Every structure is written in structure tokens, then in C-alpha cells.
Image (cartoon, rainbow, N blue to C red):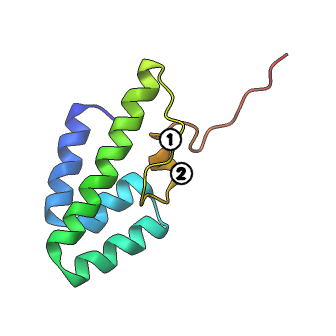
Amino acid sequence: MGAVSAIFLVLITILLPPIGAYAVAGCGADLLINICLTLLGYIPGHIHAFYLEYIYYDRREQAREGRFQASRAPGVYSDRVQSGGHGYGTIVQPVN
């Protein structure tokens, strides 16, 4: 995703935080947590969704620069967010 996609994602997250969380983390524990936080209070849902997006884009940038983050981000359960989207839905090519 480029800069325009990131801005579009932020705009969606401002309107509906669970949709922003779903776009980054997919359907899983992070989405359920975000829905609960949004129902309990609109601001906690925003904070959680923007935290997921920050971790996702930070890990993606680190992977592009060749740095590896060995520790898991606290409070994030999605492997897609933890890896910055790398390795998600891809097939590993065998080495000959």
C-alpha cells in the first residue's frame, strides 16, 4: 500500500475504527477487541485501531529497510500486523 492508501485507511479509521482494524489485521482477535472497545467508547476504539495501523506500517518499513524486529508488539494478536504484511498469504518457493 502506498501513501494514498495509507491516507485512505486513516480516513476510514476516523469514521469507523473496526473497518480500519479489519483492513490491517483481518478477521480475528484484534478485530473483536476493537469492536468491543468501540462499543464501550468511541475514543478507545480509535486508539486501538491507530495503534494497529502504526505497528503494521512500522514493521513494514523495518522489513523494507532490512531490519528485523525479533520481539512481538504488546497487545497485537495478528501475525499479519506483527510481520508488517510480509509472509501473509504467500507461498514460499523451494530452494534448489
| 92, above or below 51, in the image | above
Viewer-closest of 5 and 45: 45
Residue farthest top in this picture: 96
- For label 2, the crowd category at 10 Å Cα-Cα, with few meaning under 14, some 14 to 19 and many 20 or more, is some
Q: Can you say which quadrant of the picture contains the C terminus?
A: top right
Residue at 34% in and 35% down: 1
Residue at 28% in and 60% down: 49
Q: Secondary structure at mark 1?
A: loop
Determine which quarter of the picture holds residue 12: bottom left
Image-based side of 54 in relation to 77, left or right: left
Count of marks, rendered view: 2
Residue located beneath label 1 in the image: 83
Residue located beneath label 2 in the image: 79
Residue at 41% in and 74% down: 32
Q: Position of residue 78 (x, y in %)?
A: 49, 56
Image-based side of 90 in relation to 21, left or right: right
Q: Position of residue 76 (x, y in %)?
A: 44, 57
Q: Amino acid at mark 2?
A: Asp
Q: Position of residue 47 (x, y in %)?
A: 21, 62
Viewer-closest of 55 and 70: 70
Determine which quarter of the picture holds residue 60: top left
- For label 1, the crowd category at 10 Å Cα-Cα, with few meaning under 14, some 14 to 19 and many 20 or more, is many
Residue farthest bottom in this picture: 40
State yes or no: discs 1 and 2 in contact (Cβ < 8 Å). Answer: yes
Q: Position of residue 11 (x, y in %)?
A: 15, 52
Determine which quarter of the picture holds residue 65: top left
Residue at 19% in and 50% down: 10
Q: Amino acid at mark 1?
A: Ser
Q: Which mark is residue 28?
A: none
| Label 1, label 2: how far apart the Cα atoms are | 6 Å
